[in-house]
Amino acid sequence: MGTITEIALVLLKGIKVTLIVLVFSIILSTLIALIAGLSRSSSNLLLNKFTGFYVEIFRGTSLIVQLFWFSYALPGLFNIHLGSDIWAGVLAISLNYGAYMSEIVRGSIAAVAPGQTEASVALNMSKFQRMRHVILPQAVRMMLPEYGNYLIQILKATSLVSLIGLMDILYYGDIYRSTHLSDAPIVYILVLVFYFILALPLIAFTRKMESVSKKGVAQA
Amino acid sequence: MTWSWEVFFEVIPIIFKGMWITVGLTIVCYLFAAIFGFFWLFMDRIPFKPANWLFKWIAEFIRSTPPLVQLFFIYYAWPMVPVIGVSLNPFSAAVLGLGIHFSTYLSEVYRSGIESVEKGQWEAATALNLSTSQKWFKVILPQAIPPTIPMLGNYLIIMFKEVPLASTIGVVAMLHLANDYGAQYYKYVEPLTVVAIFFLILSYPSALLIKKLEDKYNRRFDKKYVTES
């Protein structure tokens, strides 16, 4: 038991970085997803194609490659210094998952029945009113369950930042393992348990959103 | 550090050698996950509630924890486990780790396919006095599998993009070669960009292909379309 509490205390030191990366990535990727998703649904061809290009680039390459690229290439090539590696991690994760989640936004907006758009045109609503009061409220509830799933994906992705030297849960686990080789099974089981505890609220959120999105909607 | 086309063209053949390992690892991992995915389905059908509940949570645990940590567990920690622990080479550790992780997703795909078969089909199979194997192989699976093909394809692409994780435990694939080159000459930009381009070249056309498949199956299996025609 002694070693378990000892290891847990070591891992706890890393929870701060994991949470910071998680929270900022969730906020930033949600913003990116909304903006990119709306641009993809817009009739402005230039905006539409440009966002499409961004989405395909980031969905087509691997997150771990992007993460290395942001942490090695960005400072050297463009002389952009993000201050600390935390921002390189947050930026890579957010741009990657923002691209994935923008597809949910686009898909949900496209899935709102065309009669709704026609009705709001008939009611003489402006383009903005139509989006704000008719389309989005219906689209958002369709997005929520998938959104919850992607939050769990983002949590899993935060473990990658230990590879660019951020001191998150996994980083402390690796450090401890390298000095106590025979404790490796306990170390990694505990790391997994830590991540699972962080995931539990997100799992509960996803389940809740699944029922919210079904409530009051006629089922086929 | 500046961009150099010379280095860019120099690393292309080096990274290309790693591409086959990346593609091979993806295929082996996927096959493992596809087969192991059935394991969770069977566990779900054991007529013993606590066992169902236990395996449901084990699957949930595997699904919502990082595959990177699972890889480290299998590669570094598994040999240290008393009695059942064995030392694995990086390639098999990656197949086992990523394979088990994605099997929990694929089993959900299988489940959704089976659940999409209408209740009437099950009842008709029972009414016709078909045996269990006839029911599954002649009635349920032929209807359950085709609609899931696009989803299965999507997971293949997702897995392809997770495979570079294996470079962290020493599988010498594209990303590993790029990092080696970077460490040797202190040039990271070009090799990493080449890796990204290779990923894009391989995954974008596959994504388009899967979208095509999806449209095709949507048309074929759209219930409304079938009843109208």
Image (cartoon, grey):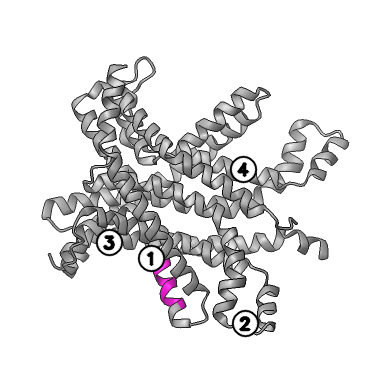
Instruction: Report if residue A146 is visible in the image.
Output: yes
Q: Tag 1's secondary structure? A: helix
Q: CA distance from mark 3 to mark 4?
A: 36 Å
Mark 1 belongs to which amino acid? Answer: Ile
Residues at discs 3 and 1 both on one chain: no
Q: CA distance from mark 4 to mark 2?
A: 44 Å
Q: Is residue A164 left or right of residue A215?
A: left
For marks 3 and 4, the one nearer the N-term is 4
Query: Can you tell which mark lies on residue B61?
Result: none
Mark 4 belongs to which amino acid? Answer: Tyr
Q: Tag 4's secondary structure? A: helix
Which residue is painted at 43% across and 48% down in the image? A153
> Residue at label 1?
A57
For mark 3, does the 10 Å Cα neighbourhood hold few (<14), some (14 to 19), or many (20 or more) residues? many
Mark 3 belongs to which amino acid? Answer: Val
Query: Can you tell which mark lies on residue A125?
Result: 2
